[in-house]
Image (cartoon, rainbow, N blue to C red):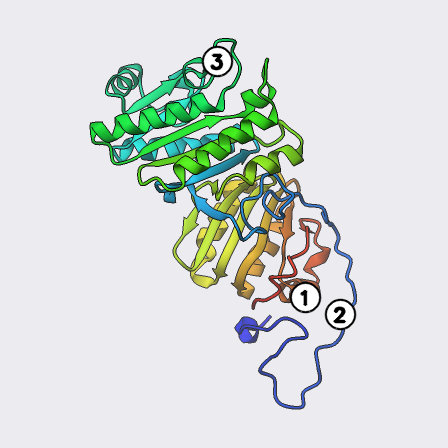
Amino acid sequence: MSASFSHRVPPHGGADDRPAGAPPFPHRAVTRWASEFPGSPYSGLGRDDPGDQGAGASWFARRPVGAMRPGDHAWLAYSGTEERDRVIGTFVRDGLDNGEKVVYVTDTPPDLLPGMRRHGEPELLALMASRRLRVIPNRDACLDARGRFQPERMLETLARETGEAFGQGFRAVRLTTDHTWALNGPGRSGLARTLCCERLFADAISPSTMAMAVCQVARHSRPSGELAALRDTHEVLVEVDPEFDDGVLTLVRTFEPHGLRVEGELDSARHAVFADRLDQLIALRRPVHLDFSRLDFIDLGGINLLARHATAPHGTPALVLDGLPPDVEHVIELVGWHRLPGIARGRRRPATRQGALL
């Protein structure tokens, strides 16, 4: 393919810069790919997805965990311990590194918490003695005398810890807890009390200039309708910090499915970093989903990178291409790369984002 394809091509059927009187783009027949995954289950692609991280819901602010700020009442529906630890671990470490107070309501021992495994016992004890780190058991933070979850007690805990932090000179308070136990454990609270807690937190945290919180739930712990109701009490959907972000290209790790979300422009200056992150995921020996639903531009060199991986030695995990812009899909089919067994077409691009590329 020649470099003549490196200019931007409008979506089929749209305006373009061809000479006046040129014939319209021909109708494209439906092309069958060697492999297809039409139901690729991306977390965050619709309002009914309880793990929605904002891609399909404009009323949520999607925020990398490193960009959280006072007033954020954030939601994290994690798919597994890796995603939870990467988000909550960063949330905790950033707070401690920035001289903020961190409050973790949990029955898990402090040395096993996300973000705490790098600290030795003496350092952990010093952090807790200085009250920079507060690990509060559930019974002391949010349970009544009979061991039942009480939203009002959780709110009192937030108010007490925030007031104390202000008096001690901390500039911010970070609070996190995992509601999975409350929804699923012995004597569970049920959805109503957990929703009440979240609404109380939203009312207290959103106007705050000191407090921020991340409310966690295991994505597969409850029916999707319950998780969606909990999610909708939050204005911020928190996710991992990008693997790479230079203001032009952003690469964000996805966990369900395993892969990368590619946002912005993938040009020749960024091929190396994209290939490096892709190699790291392929090394885990699992199919890699590439979410292109927020891609604005890709050159032929970027598409060649995909083809190179698809023709790698036998046993290399497949690349599943989700949210492909129509023009990129057309080029892949035009040169025959859709027949490669190492490339699979995943879910289609949302109708609201049909533009891009080449």
> Alpha carbon of mark 2 to alpha carbon of mark 1: how far?
9 Å
Rendered image: mark on residue 330 = 1
Three-letter code for the amino acid on which mark 1 is drawn: His
Left or right: where 50 falls relative to 275: right
The mark nearer the N terminus, 3 or 1, is: 3
Three-letter code for the amino acid on which mark 2 is drawn: Arg
Q: Position of residue 213 (x, y in %)?
A: 41, 34
C-beta proximity under 8 Å, tags 2 and 1: yes
Q: Which residue is mark 2?
A: 28
Q: Is residue 286 visible?
A: yes
Dot 3: what SS?
loop
Mark 3 or 2: the one toward you: 3
Seen from the viewer's position, the closer of residues 13 and 288 is 13
Q: Which residue is mark 3?
A: 144
Residue at x 68% of width, y 66% of height: 330
Q: Is residue 285 visible?
A: no
Indicate whether 173 appears above or below 331: above
The mark nearer the N terminus, 2 or 1, is: 2
Q: Residues within 10 Å of mark 2 (few under 14, many from 20)?
A: few
